[in-house]
Image: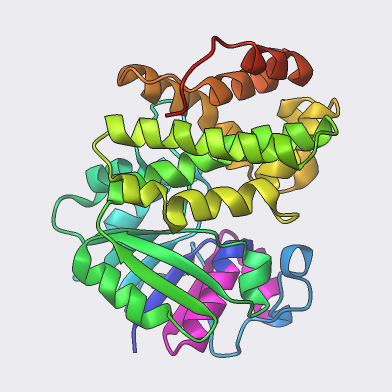
């Protein structure tokens, strides 16, 4: 039995705690506030995001101000937005039990710097603490309901294999991947392409347009990965193509929905408040472009997403800019 502490009681944190517990792990779920912890411990539900689906009774619920909140952890699981990682990494590093590893569920880059979140964690944890990332097409609403899904885990090999064994079950299959940077870049970049797919929906376009955006978006992601020393196979796998398809097409996708809202006239700075959850693509797009510029890679779809979200350019105009680019070969 693996002793896990899951930090972050949003939809994915609650879902991962449920999956790990049902697979046989001992799980403690850490909420941001005591009030949230009391409510979740009583109702056993995140009714806003997961409806009537309940946490197993054996999942302990606490909050980050409680004594011993990380005590006994073998794996500390981080289910927080990218903007919270910088502060949380330092706090977790200072309280981490000896021998424990850290597993991140966060998909994004460090806002402002464009660094991979593994780099943020490594700076805080030092070189000796095992670290891994879990990613893939993992909409919490479906996994919490017991629908089949798969994911990849990448990073420290022993920790990755421990997580694979601890959470895999009949409805959740985990693969090990040795390309940590590629898995992280996929998780960040696919959210930006999903914003574009949502804008296409908001403009009333059909399947042809969305298929083109997904395909050319994958080409963008793969170019950035190739220039960053990542494996092309990662971008064709669950963390890349798999998560990209799910995020661009699903009714559960916050990023797709945010793009649709922007195309329909909702300002980007109020979209997240209306959705009620973090939209990682909006937090990531400018950092992603800065990272791409640093390695000499052009990301035309991502550039137009940033223009629509933050420069006031109409999404229809952004589409025209993409369609009027110079003829090119497919690569």
Residue 206, by quadrant, is top right
Q: Position of residue 266 (x, y in %)?
A: 82, 28
Residue 124 or 308: which is nearer the viewer?
308
Classify the position of the C terminus by image quarter. Answer: top left
The answer to whether one can see residue 149 in this image is yes
Dominant SS in magenta: helix
Q: Position of residue 250 (x, y in %)?
A: 70, 54
Residue at image point 34% right, 89% down = 1
Residue 113 is left or right of residue 257, and the answer is left
Residue 222 is left or right of residue 202, and the answer is left
Residue at image point 66% right, 70% down = 142
Q: What colour scheme does the image use?
A: rainbow
Q: Position of residue 79 (x, y in %)?
A: 50, 59
Residue at image point 83% right, 29% down = 203
Residue 287 or 313: which is nearer the viewer?
313
Q: In the image as oriented, which residue stretches furthest toward the left?
A: 128
Residue at image point 68% right, 77% down = 145
The answer to whether one can see residue 183 in this image is no
Residue 40 is left or right of residue 103, and the answer is right
Residues drawn in magenta? 14-41
């Amino acid at each position: 039995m693996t002793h896990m502490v899951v930090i972050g009681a949003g939809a994915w944190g609650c879902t991962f705690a449920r999956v790990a517990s049902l697979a046989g792990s001992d799980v403690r779920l850490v909420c941001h506030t005591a009030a949230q912890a009391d409510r979740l411990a009583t109702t056993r539900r995140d009714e806003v995001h997961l409806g009537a689906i309940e946490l197993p009774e054996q999942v302990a619920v606490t909050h980050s101000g409680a004594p011993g909140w990380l005590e006994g952890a073998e794996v500390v699981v981080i289910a927080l937005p990218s903007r919270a990682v910088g502060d949380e990494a330092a706090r977790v590093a200072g309280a981490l039990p000896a021998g424990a590893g850290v597993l991140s569920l966060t998909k994004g880059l460090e806002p402002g710097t464009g660094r991979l979140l593994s780099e943020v964690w490594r700076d805080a944890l030092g070189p000796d603490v095992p670290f891994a990332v879990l990613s893939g097409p993992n909409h919490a609403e479906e996994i919490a309901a017991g629908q089949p899904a798969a994911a990849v885990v990448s990073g420290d090999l022993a920790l990755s294999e421990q997580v694979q064994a601890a959470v895999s079950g009949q409805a959740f299959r985990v693969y090990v991947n040795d390309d940590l940077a590629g898995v992280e870049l996929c998780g960040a970049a696919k959210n930006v392409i999903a914003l574009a797919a949502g804008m296409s929906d908001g403009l009333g376009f059909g399947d042809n347009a969305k298929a083109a955006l997904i395909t050319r978006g994958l080409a963008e992601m793969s170019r950035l990965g190739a220039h960053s020393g990542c494996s092309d196979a990662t971008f064709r796998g669950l963390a890349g193509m798999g998560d990209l398809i799910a995020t661009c097409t699903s009714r559960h996708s916050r990023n797709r929905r945010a793009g649709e809202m922007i195309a329909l006239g909702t300002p980007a700075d109020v979209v997240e408040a209306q959705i009620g959850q973090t939209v990682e693509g909006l937090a990531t797009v400018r950092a992603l472009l800065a990272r791409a510029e640093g390695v000499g890679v052009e990301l035309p779809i991502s550039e137009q997403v940033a223009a629509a979200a933050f420069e006031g350019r109409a999404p229809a105009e952004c589409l025209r800019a993409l369609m009027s680019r110079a003829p090119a070969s497919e690569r």
